[in-house]
């Protein structure tokens, strides 16, 4: 039994080291992307509250190119793959809390909320994880928003050049280096109310954020995008999607 525990610990350590290397490569890759951020006007009134960023699995690669406004907590699985992911996300500047839907989930969520309250941070959730189905919102993000006094912020993304892994359940999209990408932060949602209604509203808002990102990507000229490595913070840039086309 002791030998098995040692082997498992070594496996987690090995995955963690691989994750560090992956995180460094990801930082270099993401720094090449040319980013345009679209922020809904309603978010200006929520600057003093935690943001619980909510998005679908598979859209997160372009979202990582957005320079977050403050410390952001993420909940990562206790599995071996989670050790790799946790190390990579740590290199990318996230504050990682370990937990899962099957083991330690509530404890991990509580730790995340504690961190948000103590350090004044935000949180990020792939709301249809960890195993899907794609686009079906689970309850973790809403719970975190309620417990921390925050708001739900739907997010969407689009990229000009890259690949989408169509056979993957999450349709993971990867923007090639130096590609133009759009990150869209939608109007905030109050986490109060019936869970089923809130999940439907959040799903609709995330779909809309992805639609806006794709629309802006097609409408904006290349000159309207930041230079590689010039990613900006969460300041309100425009008065909404319509103003971005002027």
Image (cartoon, rainbow, N blue to C red):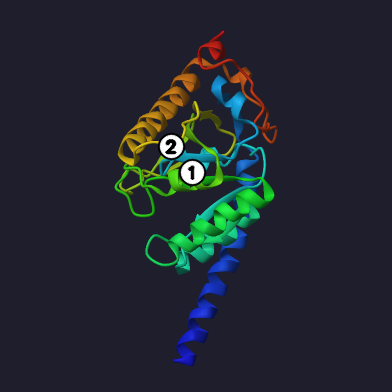
- Image mark for residue 186: none
Viewer-proximal residue, 195 or 55?
195
**What is the x, y in percent for residue 143?**
45, 47
Question: Can the viewer see residue 56 in this picture?
Answer: yes
At 36% across and 31% down in the image, what residue appears? 201
Q: Quadrant of residue 20?
A: bottom right
Sooner in the amino-acid sequence: mark 1 or mark 2: 1
At 30% across and 39% down in the image, what residue appears? 196
Dot 2 corresponds to which residue? 192
Callout 2 crowding tier (Cα within 10 Å): few <14, some 14–19, many ≥20:
few
Callout 1 crowding tier (Cα within 10 Å): few <14, some 14–19, many ≥20:
some
At 38% across and 54% down in the image, what residue appears? 130
Q: CA distance from mark 1 to mark 2?
A: 7 Å
At 41% across and 67% down in the image, what residue appears? 103
**What is the x, y in percent for residue 228?**
67, 33
Q: Quadrant of residue 50?
A: top right
Dot 1 corresponds to which residue? 146
Q: Are marks 1 and 2 in contact (CB under 8 Å)?
A: yes
Q: Is residue 45 above or below residue 151?
A: above
Name the side, left or right, on which 154 lies relative to 21.
left
Q: Is residue 182 above or below residue 17?
A: above
Report helix, strand or loop for mark 1: helix
**What is the x, y in percent for residue 171?**
36, 43
Pick out the residue farthest to the front: 193
């Amino acid at each position: 039994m002791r030998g098995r525990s040692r082997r498992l610990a070594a496996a987690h350590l090995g995955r963690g080291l691989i994750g560090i290397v992956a995180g460094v490569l990801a930082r270099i890759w993401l720094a090449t992307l040319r980013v345009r951020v679209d922020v809904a006007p309603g978010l200006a009134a929520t600057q003093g509250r935690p943001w619980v960023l909510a998005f679908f699995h598979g859209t997160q690669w372009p979202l990582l190119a957005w320079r977050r406004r403050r410390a952001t907590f993420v909940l990562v699985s206790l599995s071996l793959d989670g050790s790799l992911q946790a190390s990579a996300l740590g290199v990318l500047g996230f504050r990682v809390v370990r937990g899962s839907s099957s083991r330690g989930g509530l404890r991990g969520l509580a730790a995340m909320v504690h961190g948000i309250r103590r350090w004044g941070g935000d949180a990020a959730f792939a709301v249809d994880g960890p195993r899907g189905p794609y686009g079906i919102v689970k309850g973790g993000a809403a719970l975190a928003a309620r417990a921390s006094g925050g708001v739900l912020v739907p997010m969407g993304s689009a990229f000009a050049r890259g690949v989408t892994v169509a056979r993957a359940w999450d349709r993971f999209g990867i923007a090639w280096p130096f590609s133009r990408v759009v990150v869209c932060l939608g109007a905030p949602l109050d986490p109060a109310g019936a869970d089923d209604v809130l999940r439907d509203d959040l799903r609709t808002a995330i779909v809309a954020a992805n639609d806006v990102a794709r629309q802006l990507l097609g409408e904006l000229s290349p000159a309207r995008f930041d230079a590689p490595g010039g990613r900006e913070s969460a300041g309100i840039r425009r008065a909404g999607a319509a103003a971005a086309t002027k």
